[in-house]
Amino acid sequence: MIEITVNRRQMRELKAFFAEAPRELQTVLSRAINKVGVTARKRIIDIIAQQIAVKKSDLRNRNVTLRRATYRDLMANIVISGRRIPIFNFGARQTKKGVTYRISRSGGRKTALGAFMESYASGTPIQMRSGHRGVFRRRQLEGHELARLPIEEIFGPSVPVAAENISALTEASLNNVIGSRLEKEITTQVGVILQRHRRSA
């Protein structure tokens, strides 16, 4: 989880600036934090999609969420979540040896030996009753014939686990980007408030 909020220095300076209009302070901060939150979420999605072979639309809809700051709670949170992703979603292709797939956009394809996503007899895609398609293999159990072994689906990493290995998403990297953007956005929002007061004066 990535938190977006003002630091003590910023809060101290802003409280002094808005000493006679504390409600304006809440407006400035909530707007600034949320604008930075939206920008930071988009940046995180872009970085993950550049490194891992997942769709941006899936990241937006399932994996990277933004909880916005409110007038009373001046903190926004970006949460990266999600279960392990089926390797079918990583460009899976059936071969004679098994199924190939690629998780990292910069890396080569890997092979899940003995795996299958198509019927050996007809070559048609295997689809569960629910409509779900995936990559499967028979679980290895000693003393059992191959044809009678239970079938299990194969999964790759979850988005949170994959994101841990992306240097641009380390806490230090994100804090530097978010901190500088928040400073600029606060200045912008203060300017909006001052301009509004000039017009009404």
Image: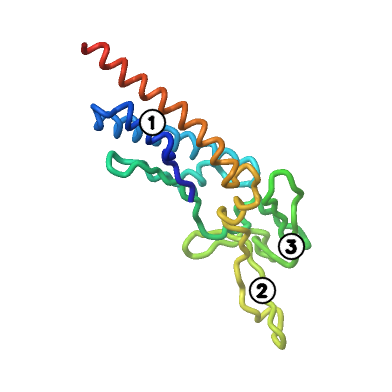
Amino acid residing under circle 2: Arg
Residue furthest toward the left?
201
Residue drawn at 73 percent across, 44 percent down: 106
Q: Is residue 48 visible?
A: no
Indicate the position of residue 45 as horizontal and vertical percent values: 54, 41
Name the mark nearer the viewer: 1 or 3: 1
Residue 192 % position (x, y):
34, 20
Name the image colouring. Answer: rainbow
In percent of the image, x 31 and y 41: which residue is there? Answer: 70
Q: Which residue, given by chain and number where applicable, does mark 2 sit on?
A: 138
- The residues tagged by marks 3 and 2 sit, at their Cα atoms, a distance apart of 12 Å
Residue 130 lies left or right of residue 87; in this view the side is left
Per the image, the residue denoted by label 3 is 98
| Residue 155 percent location from the top left of the image | 61, 62
**The disc label shown at residue 13, or none:** 1
Amino acid type assigned to the residue bearing label 1 in the image? Glu
> What amino acid is labelled 3 in the image?
Gly
Q: Secondary structure at mark 1?
A: helix
Q: CA distance from mark 1 to mark 3?
A: 62 Å
What residue appears at the point 24 percent right and 32 percent down from the top-left corner?
23
Look at the numbered disc 3 and give the secondary structure of its residue.
Answer: strand
Residue 15 visible in the current orientation: yes
Mark 2: give few (<14), some (14-19) or many (20+) Cα within 10 Å. some
Measured along the vertical axis of the image, is residue 38 above or below residue 126?
A: above
Q: Nearer the viewer, mark 1 or mark 2?
A: 1
Residue neighbourhood size for the residue with mark 3, other residues' Cα within 10 Å, grouped as few (<14), some (14–19), many (≥20): some
Residue at x-position 61% and y-position 73%: 151
